Image (spheres, rainbow, N blue to C red):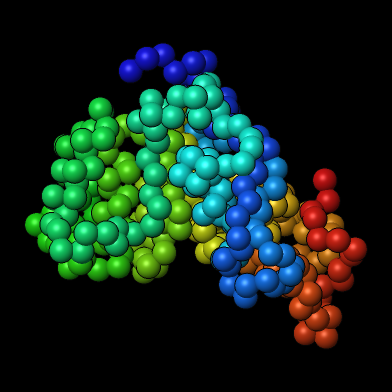
Amino acid sequence: MENLGYYNGETGKAMLEVEKLNKTYPYSGPNRGNPTGREVFSLKDISFTLPGGCILGFIGVNGAGKTTTLKSILNIAKPDSGTVRFLGQNFYEHEALLKQKIGFMPGPADYYQKTKAKKVADVYRRFFTEWDGNVFNDYLCRFGIDAEKKIGELSAGSKVKFALALALSHNAKLLILDEPTGGLDPVARDELLGLFREIASSADRSILFSTHITADLDKCADRIIFIKNGELIADDTREGLVEKHRRLTGTDAALEDIMIYHHREAAGTWNPNRDPQDRRTSGSRFPA
């Protein structure tokens, strides 16, 4: 593989840089046309940096733009504008090369239901020059997955784990995971989050994962970015978000309460009688 630029695995050095990413298409989220009344859904100037050795949690309600952002970063959904740099290079100019170093999990393995897991893996591995069958088999063993089973025979949790095993088995430096803990029971979720911490303990590996399960962020995220209606409204540590919410509303709150508050505010359903602890100020963006 050719030299991938300046990134050398130094903790804190930018591994992924996203700048002013925009994407517009017909709005297809819940409650079409509400709460904003827009005819289209748009990502607006999405910008953030992910350093090496970091777990970045991407939070927002369903339909806020998390999946669209991840797919736009990877050029699966072609962005209208913006730049993405990965390992020091322009991602869109070196897409085929750089995708060798990214493990992407778009959700549980719900494809090829009548095909054995080992056959799916055999096809998947051919796209990656650094595929390691031993690593893949180790993850299958760790996750308790029988490769002889058909995809349709796997439980919901095992489908998630199988998809993750694929993403982890070709020496990826960056894992981009869309709702990776969905469908997992509490024990399996805790084990998976522990694996995330293990992976990101190395300065040359990072994780970007979307979720609406705020307990996941409490357990493993180094930083959190918060998206609402296609716009990033916060990028901070968990403690920083809680403090900024306190300054905005005058109250302390858990991450889940913060997400609910901003969703209600955007939908115009905030109710001071129902939520007397919230003393809303004008606007809903976190203070700087």
Locate residue 142, reporting x and y percent: 22, 51
Does the rendering let one see residue 193? no
Locate residue 144, reporting x and y percent: 19, 57
Name the side, left or right, on which 251 lies relative to 230. right
Instruction: Note whether 137 is above or below 218 in the view shown.
Output: above
Count of number-bearing discs = 0
* Residue found at x 54% / y 52%: 68
Locate residue 207, reporting x and y percent: 47, 42
Quarter of the rendering occupied by the N terminus: top left
Name the side, left or right, on which 12 lies relative to 3. right
* Residue found at x 26% / y 28%: 130
* Residue found at x 50% / y 29%: 91
120 or 198: which is nearer to us?
Answer: 120
Locate residue 200, reporting x and y percent: 44, 38
Task: Farthest residue to the bottom: give it.
Answer: 273
Name the side, left or right, on which 36 lies relative to 139. right
Name the side, left or right, on which 142 lies relative to 101. left
